[in-house]
Image (cartoon, rainbow, N blue to C red):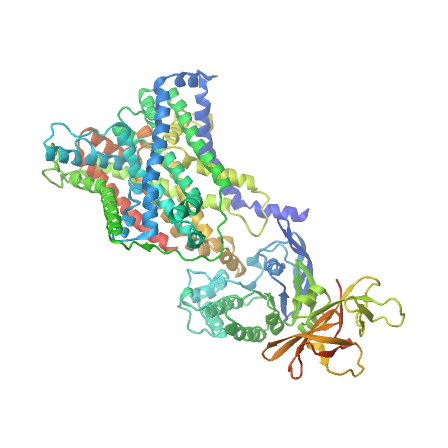
């Protein structure tokens, strides 16, 4: 009895109680309440419970069409990304040839490109008034542009460009994990190379491929910039929600939001179910080290090199175009293949105009607030989630831990549109829960949305660092007399901060270019960079839009380089 | 009052009982060993002494005070971990000074104590080195220096030599023992290596399957193992299944082997005699199994045939068959011995031990 009491006291120390309460309150207000209020309100009309919202929107052709379009686009994107990403991963992971490193270095570029910036770059390159179209038009003396960047082909092309890295990166990682001796064993048992791939490698790659498919599907479901700028007749759900809100039809917007959220979460659940059934026990024996085979023969080697150079150029072209256009004099680029006159005016405008400078300051401040909060938050979450080795914990049970990880993960699984709409819905008017505090229409709504959307990234990064930490180090510190806070400050923190800061930087740069959620809830007081880019584009100030994009890309590149350095510090 | 005493410690992980009802006492200044095969619970016991693991039941007393619920940082025990657990972000000096910082020592005292600790482990002037620049043996010394720098009330070792190669291990072993004795420290040393435990420890507890089987001086454990598990874990042993003879009243130390049906006589040292009509084990070390070509009427002389002679350098192992009872004999010279030759085996009564099951 006495022992039971001291145990409880040890578990429920004052410090962990404060963290516990703070985390619970933030999750309650940030995740549970907004999402619940959207769901509840979607079932309400004029204060009474009803299914009318659903029957109404689901009977509208346009809504059904948008659901089908979203699903079709996402599934199509998965197929195309797999067709591009998986063969490239095999080629670049298994073989070595000239040009391999060039492509490998650039492969993940589209992942760090903010979707809006990528979309704009794509328009400059492939749009009907873009460099490629003009080039062909001028070359063959055509009257009309040879194509229009509109609808299904345009969306699928752009999505494949931006999301194929999920398949490329995860398949590559999966291939690296597979023990080379398994393939060698299969060969020695008489399997031909093709059968080795089909019967030995692919089955083991299934978890990687599924993870890539899920990421691609969910990113595609959440995609907004491309459908907005060149979707044409293809109306996807995110776009429908946006236009419904613009029209002032809030009931329709939240009902569609629930539909979008349900589809995304369903994909996640199906994936996790399946993943659980297919885990391969990593054969722990020491395997033969995998070595990339050199492509010896002439023709294949040349072909592989051509493929590498071609895809490297494809990856870089949109960004290069953006650079070029950012130096184009406004109005100088009409029917020529390349802009005719170049100037620094676009960049001077960014520095000179107070409105332009303000946009950068806004985005910087809001992203920094969100990222810093996410960093502190991640330490709180990890502290609560960590298994205590010394005491079999009775207070924070296993179930509670799982609930906590789930709640932290939810904002990551939901499209940005859903997060923004639910926060806007929950904090649009004074409510009993929040006193009279209203978030909508204030500066703070964007930092809050950024925090909710990107804190899972930081938590994951910190968790990964913690897992690499040798637990005996903390034990050694304890046996040397260091109390809990000393162990944290002097052993844990110095070893995990590079990973945590790298994760925070990633969250920071993604928030910096955020558009999907920003466009729904921004106000003049917190206009972010992405909104400025979109409005410059609308006013046909192509050079200015490109200049914004280039500055954003430069900031992101620097941050990612710093993050990469930090990762290696671990 | 003993220096350190464990009272009925138990610890369960999931459904496995890692440590079951372990009680033992360590005297001040003693070098105490916990010896057992891997997974026997010796490390868990050590971790409970260190405070890194809490017992499910039982208590730990140190110098008369109950420290069962005291967190590790307040016990003041130095611990040397199997993987050394050196802090990778700190240099050698900072690693050794870690515990002194936690105790808020002055800079001067810290310098002095780190320097002397590094000298004690024969690494003077290594303070500025990064720990990953050091060899395995040097890292091991830093781990020891770090543990002794805090002037621990008790020094705990978790298989500290198992990551070193053989030649280095023996050298470090004697240095370690010498160091601990010189500083007058009390140590608890966990190992699965019998030779290491014998060379280092004043007393040893043998653990098997979470239970403490026997505690004693190395020679005692080797020559008079009390249990089958101890006898078979500590070096090679001939285990002979036998039954106490019920017929005679005066010959309480007389047994009949189940294989070969030989009558064996013991110099009875065990207070509790084996039960009647229930097979028990007798043990005798191979080096005590004597071979002779002719019988000279000694007690426990059995006729046998040589089956196999295994040469292993300084000694040879001879396997003999005494009418179905297989025995191993360790001999220095095999002159005149041949396979299939007949001989006599002598199992002298004072070397035959009766084991508890």
In the rendered image, residue A294, in percent from the top left (x then y), is placed at 31, 55
Asked whether A436 or B316 is in front, the reply is B316
Q: Is residue A304 visible?
A: yes
Question: Is A498 positioned to the left or the right of A486 in the image?
Answer: left
Q: Who's the residue at 38% across and 32% down the image?
A: A415
Asked whether B214 or A275 is in front, the reply is A275
In the rendered image, residue B318, in percent from the top left (x then y), is placed at 66, 76
Asked whether A250 or A354 is in front, the reply is A250
Quarter-of-image position of residue A419: top left
Q: Is residue A332 visible?
A: no
What is the count of numbered marks? Answer: 0
Quarter-of-image position of residue B335: bottom right
In the rendered image, residue B349, in percent from the top left (x then y), is placed at 78, 76
In the rendered image, residue A342, in percent from the top left (x then y), is placed at 11, 40
Asked whether B24 or A286 is in front, the reply is A286
Q: Who's the residue at 50% across and 69% down the image?
A: B164
Q: Quadrant of the C terminus of chain A?
A: bottom left
Q: Is residue B188 above or below residue A62?
A: below
Q: Is residue A233 above or below residue A187?
A: above
Q: Who's the residue at 24% across and 37% down the image?
A: A358
């Amino acid at each position: 009895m006495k022992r039971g009491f001291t145990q409880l006291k040890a578990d429920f120390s004052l410090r962990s109680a404060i963290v516990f309460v703070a985390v619970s309150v933030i999750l309650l207000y940030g995740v549970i309440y907004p999402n619940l209020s959207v769901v509840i309100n979607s079932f309400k009309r004029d204060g009474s419970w009803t299914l009318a919202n659903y029957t109404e929107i689901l009977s509208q052709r346009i809504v059904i069409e948008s659901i089908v379009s979203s699903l079709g686009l996402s599934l199509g994107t998965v197929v195309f990304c797999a067709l591009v990403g998986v063969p490239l991963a095999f080629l670049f992971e298994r073989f070595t040839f000239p040009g391999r490193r060039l492509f490998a270095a650039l492969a993940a570029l589209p992942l760090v490109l903010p979707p809006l910036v990528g979309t704009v770059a794509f328009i400059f390159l492939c749009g009907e008034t873009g460099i490629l179209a003009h080039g062909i038009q001028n070359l063959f003396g055509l009257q009309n542009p040879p194509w229009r960047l509109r609808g299904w082909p345009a969306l699928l092309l752009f999505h494949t460009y931006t999301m194929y890295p999920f398949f490329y990166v995860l398949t590559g990682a999966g291939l690296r994990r597979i023990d080379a001796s398994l393939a060698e064993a299969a060969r020695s048992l008489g399997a031909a190379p093709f059968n080795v791939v089909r019967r030995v490698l692919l089955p083991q790659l299934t978890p990687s491929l599924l993870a890539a498919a899920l990421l691609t599907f969910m990113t595609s479901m959440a995609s907004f910039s491309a459908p907005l700028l060149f979707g044409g007749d293809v109306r996807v759900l995110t776009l429908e929600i946006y236009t419904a809100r613009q029209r002032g039809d809030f009931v329709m917007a939240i009902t569609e939001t629930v539909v979008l959220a349900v589809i995304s979460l369903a994909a996640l659940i199906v994936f996790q179910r399946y993943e659980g059934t297919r885990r391969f026990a990593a054969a722990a024996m020491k395997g033969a080290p995998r070595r990339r085979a050199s492509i010896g023969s002439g023709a294949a080697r040349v072909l592989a090199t051509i493929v590498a150079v071609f895809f490297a150029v494809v990856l870089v072209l949109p960004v290069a175009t953006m650079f070029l256009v950012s130096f184009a004099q406004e109005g100088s680029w009409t029917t020529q293949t390349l802009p005719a006159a170049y100037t620094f005016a676009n960049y001077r405008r960014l520095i000179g105009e107070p409105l332009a400078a303000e946009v950068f300051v806004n985005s910087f401040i809001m992203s920094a607030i969100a990222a810093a909060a996410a960093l502190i938050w991640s330490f709180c979450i990890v502290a609560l989630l960590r298994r205590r080795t010394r005491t079999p914990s009775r207070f924070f049970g296993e179930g509670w831990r799982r609930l906590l990880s789930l709640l932290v993960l939810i904002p990551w699984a939901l499209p940005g549109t859903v997060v923004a709409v639910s926060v806007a819905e929950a904090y649009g008017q004074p409510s009993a829960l929040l006193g009279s505090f209203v978030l909508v229409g204030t500066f703070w709504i964007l930092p809050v949305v950024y925090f909710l959307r990107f804190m899972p990234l930081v938590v994951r990064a910190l968790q990964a660092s913690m897992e690499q930490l040798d637990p005996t180090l903390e034990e050694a510190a304890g046996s040397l007399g260091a109390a809990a806070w000393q162990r944290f400050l002097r052993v844990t923190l110095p070893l995990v901060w590079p990973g945590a800061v790298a994760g925070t930087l990633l969250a920071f740069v993604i928030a910096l270019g955020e558009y999907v959620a920003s466009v729904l809830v921004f106000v003049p007081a917190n206009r972010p960079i992405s909104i400025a880019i979109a409005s410059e584009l609308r006013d046909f100030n192509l050079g200015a839009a490109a200049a914004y994009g280039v500055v954003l890309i430069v900031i992101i590149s620097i941050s990612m380089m710093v993050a990469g350095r930090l990762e290696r510090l671990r | 009052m003993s220096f350190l005493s464990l009272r009925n410690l138990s610890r369960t992980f999931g459904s496995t009982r890692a440590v079951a009802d372990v009680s033992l006492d360590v005297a001040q200044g003693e070098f105490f060993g916990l010896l057992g095969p891997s997974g026997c619970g010796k490390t868990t016991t050590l971790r409970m002494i260190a405070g890194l693991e809490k017992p499910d039941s039982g208590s730990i007393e140190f110098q008369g005070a109950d420290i069962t619920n005291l967190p590790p940082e307040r016990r003041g025990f130095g611990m040397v971990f199997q993987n050394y657990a050196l802090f990778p972000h700190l240099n050698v000096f900072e690693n050794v000074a870690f515990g002194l910082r936690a105790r808020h020592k002055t800079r001067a005292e810290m310098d002095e104590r780190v320097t002397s600790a590094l000298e004690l482990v024969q690494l003077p002037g290594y303070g500025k080195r990064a720990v990953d620049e050091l060899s395995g043996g040097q890292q091991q010394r830093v781990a020891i220096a770090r543990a002794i720098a805090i002037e621990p009330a008790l020094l705990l070792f978790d298989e500290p030599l198992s990551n070193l190669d053989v030649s280095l291990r023996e050298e470090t072993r004697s240095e370690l023992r010498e160091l601990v004795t010189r500083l007058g420290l009390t140590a608890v040393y966990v190992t699965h290596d019998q030779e290491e435990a014998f060379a280092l420890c004043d007393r040893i507890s043998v653990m098997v399957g979470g239970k403490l089987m026997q505690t004693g001086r190395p020679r005692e454990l080797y020559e008079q193992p009390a249990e089958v598990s101890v006898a078979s874990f500590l070096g090679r042993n001939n285990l002979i299944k036998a039954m106490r003879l019920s017929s005679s009243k005066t010959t309480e130390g007389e047994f009949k082997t189940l294989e070969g049906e030989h009558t064996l006589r013991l110099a009875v040292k065990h207070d509790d005699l084996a039960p009647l009509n229930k097979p028990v084990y007798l043990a005798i070390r191979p080096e005590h199994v004597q071979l002779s070509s002719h019988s000279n009427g000694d007690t426990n002389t059995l006729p046998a045939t040589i089956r196999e002679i295994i040469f292993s350098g300084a000694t040879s192992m001879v396997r003999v068959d005494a009418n179905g009872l297989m025995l191993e004999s360790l001999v220095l010279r095999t002159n005149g011995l041949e396979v299939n030759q007949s001989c006599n085996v002598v199992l002298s009564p004072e070397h035959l031990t009766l084991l508890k099951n």
